Amino acid sequence: KQEVTQIPAALSVPEGENLVLNCSFTDSAIYNLQWFRQDPGKGLTSLLLIQSSQREQTSGRLNASLDKSSGRSTLYIAASQPGDSATYLCAVRRPDNSKLTFGKGITLSVRP
Amino acid sequence: DAGVIQSPRHEVTEMGQEVTLRCKPISGHNSLFWYRQTMMRGLELLIYFNNNVPIDDSGMPEDRFSAKMPNASFSTLKIQPSEPRDSAVYFCASSLVGEGNQPQHFGDGTRLSIL
C-alpha cells in the first residue's frame, strides 16, 4: 500500500528565504507526482505535475524534483513571500488507475 | 471558466439525518473524485467515476455512504444515517483522464458538521 509522508507538518520562515519542502513515498512504481497548494477554507490548487519519466518541473519561483528510485520529491520555493503562506500537499498517482494518494501536507507560514 | 462547483459550502445537521452533497465537475472532464479531509487522516479518496461509472469505491467507509453520477455534469454523495464521526470537509475533483497527464481540479469543498 502506497504511503506518502511530508515532514515537518509545519514550517515558519522569514520573507525572502529560499526553502525546500520534502515529500517521500514508499512505492516507487508511480505514474506521476503532483504538488498542490491549499489555502484555508479552500480546495486544492495544482502547482506542478511531474511525470514518472521526468526529473523536475518549474513554474515561476517553484521548482519540483522527483527521484523515483529513492521515493522522494522536493518542492523548492525561491524568495518566499507572505502570499506563499498555505498548506502544500504532494500526491502520487498509481500507474494502473487515476487514484491519488496524498501526504498530510506541510503548513507554511512566511513572516513579513 | 467555471471550476468544480460544490454545494452546500457548509452543512450542520443532527446525527441520524440524511446528508446529500452535490458536485458539478468541469465541463468536458470525464473523471470525478470524492475525497474526505480530516485533521487526523488527511485527504482520503472515497470513490471515483470514469465516464459516469464508479471505478474504485474501496475508500467508501461503510454502507451508510453512497455516491451516484447520473450524468456527466452532476454527482452526489449521500450519507444516511449520518454520525458525528462523519464530520469533515468533503471535496469533489474532476479531471480529463486518458489524454496525457492532466491534473485534478478541486472544488472548494463542503464543510460538514454532524452534531
Image (cartoon, rainbow, N blue to C red):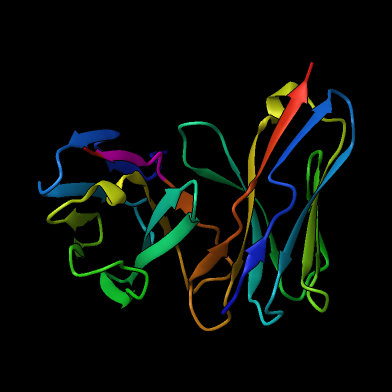
Is B97 placed left or right of B20 in the picture? right
Along the viewing direction, whichever of B62 and B21 lies nearer the viewer: B62
- Quadrant that contains the C terminus of chain A: top right
Query: Could one spot residue A6 in this view of the protein?
Result: yes
Q: Tell me if residue A104 is in the magenta stretch.
A: no
Quadrant of residue A37 within the rendered picture = top right
- Which region is colored magenta? B107-113
Is A75 located above or below residue A17 in the figure?
A: below
The residue positioned 68% from the left and 29% from the top of the image is: A85
Is B113 placed left or right of B92 in the picture? left
The residue positioned 21% from the left and 37% from the top of the image is: B115
From the top left corner, tell me how far across and down residue B17 is, in percent.
Answer: 10, 46
Is B12 located above or below residue B53 in the figure?
A: above
Q: Tell me if residue B111 is in the magenta stretch.
A: yes
Along the viewing direction, whichever of B90 and A76 lies nearer the viewer: B90
From the top left corner, tell me how far across and down residue A58 is, in percent.
Answer: 80, 50
Is A62 placed left or right of B50 in the picture? right
